[in-house]
Image (cartoon, helix red, strand yellow):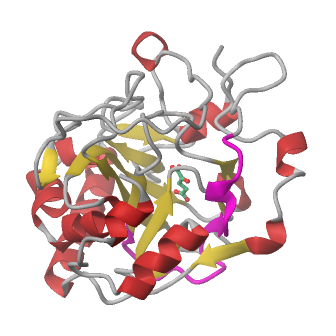
Amino acid sequence: MTPDNILAHPPRVLSQAQRGGYFETGFFAAEGLIPAEWLRRLIALSDRFIEDSRAVAASNAAFDFGPTHCPERPHVRRLRALVDRHPDFWGFAAESVFADIAADLVGPDVKFHSSKLNYKWPGAGEVVKWHQDIPAWPHTNYSPVTLGIYLCDVPPEQGPLTCVAGSHQGPIFVHRDDGGAWSGSIRDADMATVDLNRAQDLTGPAGTVIAINCRTVHASRANFTDRVRPVALFVYSSADAFAWMPAPTPTTKTGAIVRGEPARIAHLDPTPCPVPPDWSRHGYGSIFTAQDAEIG
Ligand SMILES: O=C(O)CCC(=O)C(=O)O
């Protein structure tokens, strides 16, 4: 669906101004949309998985660990395929108001793609470099949105995501190094063409919902506090968007229709998109492993 088609449907949760702002800038952050009970549940689950990680020695299908992970000082960078980790994560993604927010941004027929819970631990080492999401999981159109919820207060010094306004209407960059290896980030020469004066931090209290269009250039800042920053991220698209390469981190729910009906006709946007590695052959890891070590 195109933004005009989407906006022609009445909103369920967001104001028309919030939806219009998303399509104009390529992102938004909004407080007060998620019931307190859901927020408490997600935070409790997140805390529980950190506790459980103490008994796990190495990264696996559920956990992506930093290099210093140990039972005394767990260092979970990412909980992978979140909706497969606990039924309540899928309940939140499919049955809560969160899926209605997705419908306001991708149209009434909503397809679920993927999910993860990213932690950013204190220290400058865990910045995520500038990137767009769509080159890792290209679709036939550019409706996919990454919808997130902060599970703690996120002031500017606690590793907020930061997005460049209007960049979703610009080029889709190649996320490979000069040798052609997947880097998960935009090359310096391409970033020199992006107006970073238009970058805005997505800050807010626990429960703040953030939405980032799949073409929006974004990054996340270092965490200068002594507290971890968890954000749960869920990707949705219009039902008429079809992934044309294997998903990097498929879940058992990938492709499920969470609102409305499956599409009978695919929407094909003519804007070209670079081709990622075939993740079904290479395995994906996470954006942290991709940005640390490049995959050919
Ligand atoms: O967790 C973060 O701070 C950034 C996450 C992000 O941009 C991504 O996973 O694509």
Q: In the image, 225: left or right of 266?
A: right
Say whether residue 61 is visible: yes
Could you say which quadrant of the image residue 216 lies in? bottom right
x%, y% of residue 85?
20, 45
Please give the name of the residue rendered at 23% of the width and 36% of the height, measured from the top-left corner.
254
In this view, the residue in front, 136 or 61, is 136
Q: In the image, 95: left or right of 169?
A: left
Q: In the image, 63: left or right of 225?
A: left
x%, y% of residue 9?
25, 71
Q: Is residue 158 magenta?
A: yes
Looking at the figure, which quarter contains the C terminus?
top right
Magenta segment, principal secondary structure? loop
In this view, the residue in front, 137 or 289, is 137
Say whether residue 159 is visible: no
Q: Is residue 256 magenta?
A: no
In this view, the residue in front, 76 or 260, is 260
Q: Say above or below: 264 vs 73.
A: above
x%, y% of residue 31?
38, 87
x%, y% of residue 276?
56, 23
Q: Please give the count of numbered marks on the rendered protein.
A: 0
Q: Say above or below: 6 vs 16.
A: above
In this view, the residue in front, 138 or 140, is 140
Please give the name of the residue rendered at 66% of the width and 78% of the height, measured from the top-left corner.
157
Please give the name of the residue rendered at 10% of the width and 48% of the height, measured from the top-left corner.
261
Could you say which quadrant of the image residue 219 lies in? bottom right
Instruction: Tell me where the magenta segment starts and ends, as one range.
Output: 149-172
